[in-house]
């Protein structure tokens, strides 16, 4: 009986096919159409019974295919009919709508009050002033370039984050770059190199250089000074960014399949056409913190004195501290550092990396900012931040935590038409943003979307100016953690300065560690290696671990058994205590 019930749909299809065929010969040729339809469904049922890959189809021929149909259209059904406006998957409908409205210059106001739960845990707001300032020019800019930089760059505080040609379509790259030119802000190339599409409309570029050294690599994949200098001195290249890691998949490399190495991508990346290309998980041009800074200095010289820095997602805190100590030891400092949060997501990655690897932006940014303050170098080094930044409030909160400027990737993807279909890795993006299919790309009209990119940038900065004026400050650089308030529970709120306390300028140089993260892990770091001097468990147990607050850093000799001890797993938190 169970067999009959499971196969009922299949049997009915067979009967309908036979009946339609009989009626075709007996009554009218018009019955041929349903005969063909039911005949095709009969063939599908036979295939379902004989295939071995899908149990549902094998047990429920014909009708079992509905399960896969519903699964296929589930994201669209959920997005258009079931999703709440505030549900973040990963961006809420409210967030996406805000970008669309500002990009199209339609009404971005909302009547009848907030839809946010102002008493829910995690709700945040900015305190307003009873003496607001008058909004001035919203074209907020900073100058990037330290003491060793001879070509400092006037950078907008809101720019396009790193996305490569190849991950983005040619039309999307052109629209973003033209929009950057129209709006006078910068466009990060992503680690895929500078393509012809990045240069076509004259937008300012931040050249992102990853471990594959695309655009500046020799035949063996090693960094080439000659090729780098040739590209870096191009007038459109304003800054050079070394990618140490990215929030979407920190510590993870990748392989570009041969089928994706088209002539255009090969040209941009400087690799052979239709040949598999490896992007390692680590750099080959340096191995230690000191060598990293020497590489920064070399790139600055080869580029003719342009600002050079690096981008990272914070992992083990002692590795970041090792870079900080290398700055003190060598006297070499980057012109800027971009902190990418683990919530970043334009790079496709394994689920475990997407969900559980890397430090989120707020904790990572605050750690980097506090460290630079503690070693007295914060004023020399500009800080950028990226990771799920969409609105003016996102920018205000991020800059209050220490960022000098913000980058957005998915925000500008929305501006050029992305609908969050989450089909980026399939080459079937319905809006032509993340596909190399020429037919799909045609749907993205460069001129129209370029103007939307510029509109989104400009209108977001105008909103930021109004927000700052209400808070009583004139420039985003004046924001501090005490301006932002977070609800901790139904009966408790806290300013961010209490959750992320400041370090005193030069505090770490004096051997004072007012926060646990520094007291425990700062002494573990060494300028000569990313490896810790001793294990975290030793530091926590006091076995040659953290010094007392009134003593200087403990140095463990390399010959000590502790020197080669591995750090404990699961110690990725960088949140100051």
Image (cartoon, rainbow, N blue to C red):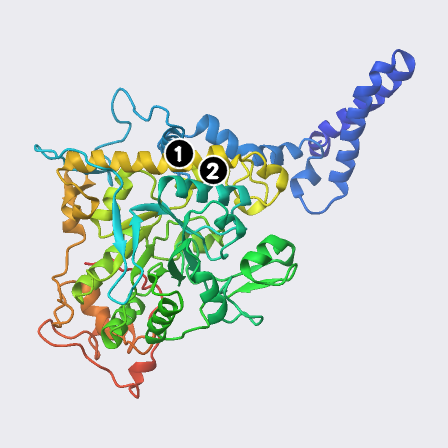
> Considering only vertical position in the picture, is 103 above or below 562?
above
Q: Give yes or no for contact between labels 2 and 1 (Cβ–Cβ under 8 Å).
A: yes
Q: Circle 2: is it few (<14), some (14-19), or many (20+) Cα within 10 Å? A: many
Q: Is residue 63 left or right of residue 511?
A: right
Q: Where the C terminus falls, by quadrant? A: bottom left
Q: Which mark is residue 333?
A: none
Q: Residue at x 22, y 58 (%)?
A: 369
Q: Position of residue 69 (x, y in %)?
A: 61, 33
Q: Position of residue 67 (x, y in %)?
A: 61, 34
Q: Where the N terminus falls, by quadrant? A: top right
Q: Which mark is residue 96?
A: 1
Q: Is residue 375 left or right of residue 562?
A: left
Q: Residue at x 15, y 55 (%)?
A: 501
Identify the residue at the far bottom of this view. Answer: 559
Label 1 sits on a secondary structure element that is helix
The earlier-in-sequence mark between 2 and 1 is 1
> Considering only vertical position in the picture, is 503 above or below 41?
below
Quadrant of the image occupied by residue 411:
top left
Residue 339 visible? The answer is yes
Q: Residue at x 75, y 34 (%)?
A: 45
Residue named by callout 2: 420
Q: Circle 1: is it few (<14), some (14-19), or many (20+) Cα within 10 Å? A: some
Taking depth in this image into account, of 545 and 431 the one nearest to the observer is 431
Quadrant of the image occupied by residue 466:
top left
Q: Position of residue 505 (x, y in %)?
A: 12, 63
Q: Is residue 234 left or right of residue 133?
A: right
């Amino acid at each position: 009986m169970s067999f009959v019930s499971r196969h009922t749909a299949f049997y009915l299809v067979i009967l309908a096919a036979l009946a339609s065929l009989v009626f075709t010969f007996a009554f009218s040729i018009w019955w041929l159409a349903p005969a063909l339809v039911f005949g095709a469904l009969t063939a599908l049922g036979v295939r379902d019974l004989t295939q071995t890959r899908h149990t549902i189809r094998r047990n429920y021929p014909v009708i079992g295919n509905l399960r896969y149909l519903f699964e296929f259209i589930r994201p669209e059904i959920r997005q258009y009919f079931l999703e709440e406006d505030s549900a973040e998957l990963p961006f809420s409908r409210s967030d996406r709508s805000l970008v669309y409205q500002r990009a199209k210059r339609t009404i971005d106001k909302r009547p009848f009050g907030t839809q946010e739960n102002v008493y829910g845990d995690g709700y945040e707001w900015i305190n307003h002033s009873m003496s607001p300032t008058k909004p001035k020019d919203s074209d907020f800019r900073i100058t990037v370039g330290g003491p060793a930089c001879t070509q400092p760059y006037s950078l907008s505080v809101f720019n396009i984050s790193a996305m490569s040609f190849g991950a983005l379509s040619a039309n999307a790259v052109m629209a973003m770059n033209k929009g950057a030119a129209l709006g006078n802000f910068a466009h990060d190339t992503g680690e895929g190199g500078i393509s012809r599409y990045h240069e076509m409309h004259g937008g300012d570029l931040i050249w992102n250089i990853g471990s594959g050294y695309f655009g500046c690599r020799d035949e063996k994949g090693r960094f080439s000074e000659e090729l780098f200098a040739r590209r870096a001195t191009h007038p459109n290249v304003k800054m050079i960014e070394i990618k140490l890691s990215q929030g979407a998949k920190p510590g993870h490399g990748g392989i570009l399949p041969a089928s994706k190495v088209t002539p255009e991508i090969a040209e941009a990346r400087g690799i052979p056409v239709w040949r598999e290309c490896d992007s390692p998980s680590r750099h080959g041009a340096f191995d230690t913190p000191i060598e990293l800074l020497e590489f920064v200095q070399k790139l600055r010289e080869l580029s003719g004195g342009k600002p050079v820095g690096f981008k990272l997602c914070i992992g083990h805190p002692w590795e970041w501290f090792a870079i900080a100590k290398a700055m003190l030891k060598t006297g070499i400092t980057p012109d800027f550092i971009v902190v990418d949060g683990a919530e970043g997501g334009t790079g496709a990655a394994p689920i475990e990396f997407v969900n559980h690897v890397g430090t989120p932006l707020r904790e990572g940014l605050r750690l980097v900012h506090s460290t630079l303050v503690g070693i007295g170098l914060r004023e020399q080094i500009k800080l950028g931040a990226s990771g799920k930044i969409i609105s003016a409030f996102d920018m205000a909160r991020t800059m209050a935590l220490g960022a000098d400027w913000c980058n957005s990737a998915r925000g500008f993807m929305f501006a050029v038409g992305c609908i969050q279909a989450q089909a980026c890795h399939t080459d079937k993006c319905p809006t032509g943003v993340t596909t190399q299919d020429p037919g799909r790309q045609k749907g993205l009209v460069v001129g129209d979307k370029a103007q939307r990119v510029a509109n989104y940038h400009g209108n977001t900065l105008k909103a930021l100016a109004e927000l700052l004026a209400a808070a009583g400050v004139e420039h985003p650089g004046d924001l501090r953690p005490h301006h932002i308030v977070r609800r901790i529970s139904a009966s408790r709120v806290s300013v961010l300065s209490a959750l992320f306390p400041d370090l005193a300028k030069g505090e770490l140089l004096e051997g004072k560690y007012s926060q646990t993260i520094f007291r425990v892990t700062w002494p573990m770091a060494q300028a000569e290696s990313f490896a810790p001097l001793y294990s975290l468990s030793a530091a926590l147990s006091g076995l040659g671990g953290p010094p007392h607050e009134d003593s200087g850093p403990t140095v463990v000799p390399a010959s000590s058994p502790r020197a080669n001890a591995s750090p404990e797993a699961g110690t990725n938190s960088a949140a100051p205590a």
